[in-house]
Image (cartoon, grey):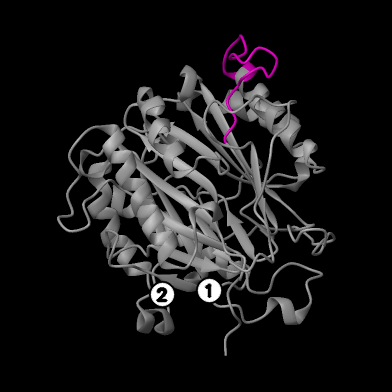
């Protein structure tokens, strides 16, 4: 890396100490990546008393404390992800949510998962804009504007914006299979629902004049992992979208997560992270036009025909979720969760090094565990790869993983050199 930008990890005593080897927030370039916050009282280190409303309130208080500790405000949040133990708690959490975002609303994803650390009922994560950037002693563009967009051609919610752009990225709310005309789930099964999710994403992108192939990362949340093949059939009809993308065989990085429940009892929900070559004002024309997406695969890590190992745009690399597979056999490695965690992290390391980066460039790690009780064993392995505990992190327990794996890990990596403009 060039050293032009710096990975900046920070912690504050006003929020709970991390329960594992990770930082509260890691800034790079124009984004702050926050670790998912549990409803922990920072003074006691324990979960707050009460039900899901009290726990959600504490999660947001912790996020607010971290955001303010780095001289930002809650309106700088561009994306919120809510993980619930019980999907029936969604309305109670929404009541708390509006207290922290009374006017502006960021993009939003809400899912119910099998388990959360410490037996919590809710865990909340935030991505925050970072207008000043991370060039040491040289603010980049402190007056960048956050651009919020909505269109009637996709489902509208009072709790979330459809798209929030900042700097060189558009962050989209996760799309449910809702018909925007009726406001109800479309008829049919997983195929029909997946198609509607992707149609909604496409409608949002078209409303902001962004091509579908500008998507750099897709996250698919499934109620039943057995539906993945049916959803993949639909997926291939959307990716690649353009003749240029088909010629290059471009497909985004991807993560598939099995959840215990989704809003409105949907079978699938799809989230997209999108490149934004135009940037947000007042970025100068020469700094914002013509940036290209750089997709890369390596033969030294397991490959999938529906995902790219890593997709870089501007100052970030997005890496597809890695399973604990043997690269040669394609099967899960022998052993327990420690061996499987080690294999996932080896794949991440291999992919990161294949694009001339190092693990110290990782800013965010997301861990999906079949058994949340395995978190301690995973941390033993994790610290051998991240001894400084710098990346921000999220850990959730999931209902199922492909090939009956015990763990799956994805990463977001700094890209200080950025991506070049089209020649």
Cα gap from disc 2 to disc 1, whole angstroms:
9 Å
Relative vertical location of residue 207 with respect to residue 103 in this rendering, above or below: below
Residue sitting at x 53%, y 74%:
211
Main secondary structure type of the part rendered in magenta: loop
Earlier in the chain: of badge 2 and badge 1, it is 1
Give the image location of residue 372, x and y in percent. Answer: 38, 26
Tell me if label 2 and label 1 are in contact, CB under 8 Å.
yes
Check disc 2 and report its element: helix, strand or loop. loop
Q: Magenta span covers which residues?
A: 36-54
Which residue matches tag 2?
A: 241
Please state the horizontal and vertical placement of residue 414, each as a whole percent of the image: 57, 59
Q: In the rendered image, which residue does mark 1 sit on?
A: 211
Quadrant of res 56: top right
Q: Quadrant of the N terminus?
A: bottom right
90 displayed left or right of 57:
left
Q: Locate the C terminus by quadrant.
A: bottom right
Residues 210 and 206: in front is: 210
């Amino acid at each position: 890396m060039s050293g032009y930008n710096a990975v900046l990890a920070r912690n504050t005593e006003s929020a709970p100490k991390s329960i594992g080897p990770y930082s509260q927030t890691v800034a790079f370039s124009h984004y702050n990546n926050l670790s998912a916050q549990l409803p922990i009282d920072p003074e006691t280190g324990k979960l707050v008393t009460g039900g899901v409303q009290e726990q959600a309130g504490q999660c947001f208080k912790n996020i607010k404390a971290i955001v303010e500790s780095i001289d930002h405000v809650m309106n700088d949040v561009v994306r919120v992800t809510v993980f619930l133990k019980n999907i029936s708690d969604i309305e109670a959490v929404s009541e708390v949510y509006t207290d922290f975002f009374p006017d502006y609303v960021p993009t939003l994803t809400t899912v119910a998962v099998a388990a959360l650390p410490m037996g919590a009922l809710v865990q909340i994560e935030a991505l925050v804009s970072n207008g000043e950037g991370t060039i040491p002693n040289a603010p980049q563009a402190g007056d960048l504007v956050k651009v919020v967009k909505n269109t009637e051609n996709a489902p509208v919610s009072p709790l979330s914006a459809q798209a929030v752009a900042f700097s060189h990225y558009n962050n989209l709310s996760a799309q449910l299979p809702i018909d925007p005309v009726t406001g109800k789930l479309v008829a049919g099964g997983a195929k029909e629902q997946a198609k509607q999710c992707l149609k909604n994403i496409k409608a949002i992108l078209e409303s902001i004049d962004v091509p579908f192939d500008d998507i750099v990362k897709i996250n698919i949340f499934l109620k039943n992992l057995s539906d993945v093949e049916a959803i993949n059939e639909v997926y291939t009809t959307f990716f690649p979208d353009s003749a240029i993308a088909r010629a290059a065989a471009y497909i985004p990085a991807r993560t598939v997560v099995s959840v215990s429940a989704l809003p409105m009892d949907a079978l699938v929900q799809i989230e997209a992270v999108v490149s934004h070559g135009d940037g947000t004002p007042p970025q100068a024309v020469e700094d914002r036009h013509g940036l290209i997406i750089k997709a890369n695969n390596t033969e030294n890590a397991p490959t999938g025909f529906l995902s790219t190992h890593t997709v870089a745009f501007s100052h970030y690399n997005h890496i597809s979720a890695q399973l604990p597979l043997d690269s040669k056999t394609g099967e899960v490695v022998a052993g327990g969760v420690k061996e499987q965690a080690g294999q996932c992290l080896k794949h991440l390391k291999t992919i990161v090094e294949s694009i001339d980066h190092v693990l110290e460039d990782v800013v965010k790690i997301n861990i999906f565990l079949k058994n949340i009780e395995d978190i301690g064993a995973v941390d033993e392995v994790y610290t051998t790869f991240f001894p400084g505990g710098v990346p921000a992190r999220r850990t959730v327990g999931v209902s199922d993983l492909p090939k009956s794996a015990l763990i799956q890990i994805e990463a977001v990596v700094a890209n200080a050199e950025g991506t070049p403009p089209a020649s």
